[in-house]
Image (spheres, coloured by chain):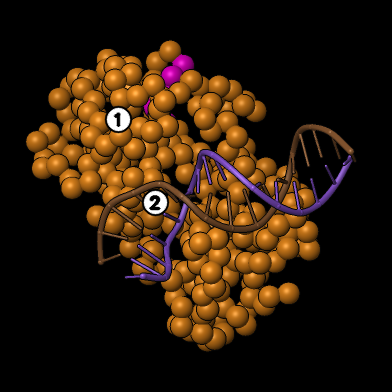
Chain colours: A orange, B purple, C brown
Amino acid sequence: MGLDEHITGRTLAKVEVFHPRAIRRHLLGAGDFVGRLSGREVVAMSRRGKYLWFELSEGLALLAHLGMSGQLLIQPDGAPDEKHLRVRFRFDDDGPELRFVDQRTFGGFLIDDLVTVDGTALPAAVAHIARDPMDPKFDAAGTVRALRRKRTELKRALLDQTLVSGIGNIYADEALWRARLHWSRATERLSAAKANEVLTAATDVMREALDQGGTSFDALYVNVNGQSGYFDRALAVYGQEGLPCGRCGTAIRREPFMNRSSYFCPRCQRRS
DNA sequence: TAATGGTCCTGTTTGC
DNA sequence: TGCAAACAGGACCATT
């Protein structure tokens, strides 16, 4: 059972904020945050890219982003507090509580108005976020065109959440490897066919990760590190520096990229 | 120590 | 020449 089935239809009661950074994007502060949630029913749950939100009554939403280490956990009443417990949500049925646990405090919540963009209701704060490839209304051809209109490095474009959402550093490296493209390839020099190929590869990677429980959307499949078994077993290049490429055997390389890393096969993914 | 990653913010560059 | 949009890169965090 996922988060949706655990939460939808229940009414929030006491909410406790243990770390201010967890609600730093809720500008009205902790008092307003907990006050507006108490007594409200969660009527639906939605997701776009790396954001998820609980739809509340009266056109409001509780918007969440997990950052890089955040977890949403369903825990029985009275279970010991986690070391990095940031927010606790209790419900009026005294059933299991929802907990936000986040070591690095990059994640957090805000209460926001729902607005309608292109026929879809979503929190105003994520109105600029593009549809992700799992979205039934995702426009693959339009995304290929938009990608090729950009004038930047390919990986930067893949990470641009206003172009296509849901792709992060790990999935980008995996998609680039599958499409045999170097991360620094200029977007304006990319054929429509290759642009489509790398986007399709990113979609495949995300879908496979979902199938293997590799996302934080399902609270029950996140381990203590916010990771899943998928990360360790199925990655072709990410974190594999020095190991042989699964296609050609060449040692995987790591290069600095935006204060982090890009992993790639120097033979399969030639810098052009 | 330096590395980790998603987003926000700021400063720079580009294009009309 | 002036302006807006696009782009690049650093800051933010805790932990190992």
| Picture quarter with the C terminus of chain A | bottom right
Tell me if residue A69 can be seen: yes
The residue drawn where x is 10% and y is 42% is A80
Nearest the camera: A3 or A105? A105
The residue drawn where x is 74% and y is 52% is A150
Indicate the position of residue A61 as horizontal and vertical percent values. 42, 24
Res A200 quadrant in image: bottom right
Chain letter of the residue beneath label 2 in the structure image: A
Disc 2: which residue: A68
Q: Amino acid at mark 1?
A: Ile
Q: Main secondary structure of the magenta part?
A: strand
Indicate the position of residue A147 as horizontal and vertical percent values. 71, 52
Q: Amino acid at mark 2?
A: Met
The residue drawn where x is 55% and y is 81% is A247
Q: Secondary structure at mark 1?
A: helix
Indicate the position of residue A130 as horizontal and vertical percent values. 60, 40
Residue A259 appears left or right of A111: right
Q: CA distance from mark 2 to mark 1?
A: 23 Å
**Taking A58 as reference, is A30 above or below it?**
below
**Taking A131 as reference, is A13 above or below it?**
above
| Picture quarter with the N terminus of chain A | top left
- The magenta span reads A59-63
Disc 1: which residue: A7
**Taking B2 as reference, is A244 above or below it?**
below
Disc on the earlier residue, 2 or 1: 1
